[in-house]
Image (cartoon, rainbow, N blue to C red):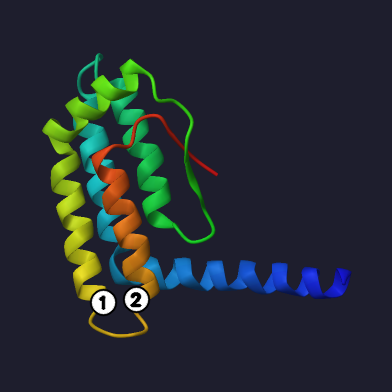
Amino acid sequence: MFCKNFINKIGGEKMSCLGNIIWMIFGGLFGAIGWIFTGILWCITIVGIPVGKQCFKMAKLQFAPFGKEVTTVNDSGTSLVLNILWLIFGGFELCIANLISALLLCITIVGIPFAAQSLKLAKLSLMPFGKEVR
């Protein structure tokens, strides 16, 4: 039983690594650059630094989404206000970019798992605050 679980765990890590490498080549890099660019724009103002830090966290997820889980940790009013501001000032454009990427990846059967990751990131692009990446 131990060997079977160990082999499955190692195989899963290899598949996540391979998936992340292919992801970076076929769209993840461009999405991460979008997150980084938006984070830099937010960090220009002192008030926007917390929003910019969130953008950089999401850029890291955009680089390697396989093997990671996003959970909601905070549903407070502050997160809601920041999510509304985010949606107005940059989240919608990044969501559209991820949706276009998902559409292009769905052309082939091999691209469907990558399209699913892109759709997960599109949803996260709309409301990223109050979320944690594990």
The C terminus lies in quadrant:
top right
| Mark sitting on residue 11 | none
Number of numbered labels in the structure image = 2
Residue located 32% across and 45% down the image: 124
Q: Name which of mark 2 and mark 1 comes first in the sequence.
A: 1
Vertical order, 25 against 44 (above or below): below
Above or below: residue 3 compared with residue 122: below
The amino acid pointed to by label 1 is: Cys
The image quadrant that residue 17 belongs to is bottom right
Query: Which residue in the structure is indicated by mark 1?
Result: 106
Image coordinates of residue 29 in percent, x first then y, are 31, 60
The residue under label 2 is: 112
| Secondary structure type for disc 2 | helix
Mark 2 touching mark 1, by CB under 8 A? yes
- Residue 12's quadrant in the figure? bottom right
Q: Judge by depth and name the residue closer to the eye, 131 or 90.
A: 131
Is 24 displayed left or right of 91 in the figure? Answer: right
At a point 71% along the width and 73% down the height, the residue shown is 8
Q: Residues within 10 Å of mark 1 (few under 14, many from 20)?
A: some
The amino acid sitting under disc 2 is Ile
Answer left or right for 71 relative to 105: right
**Which residue is pictured at 24% across the width and 33% down the height?**
40
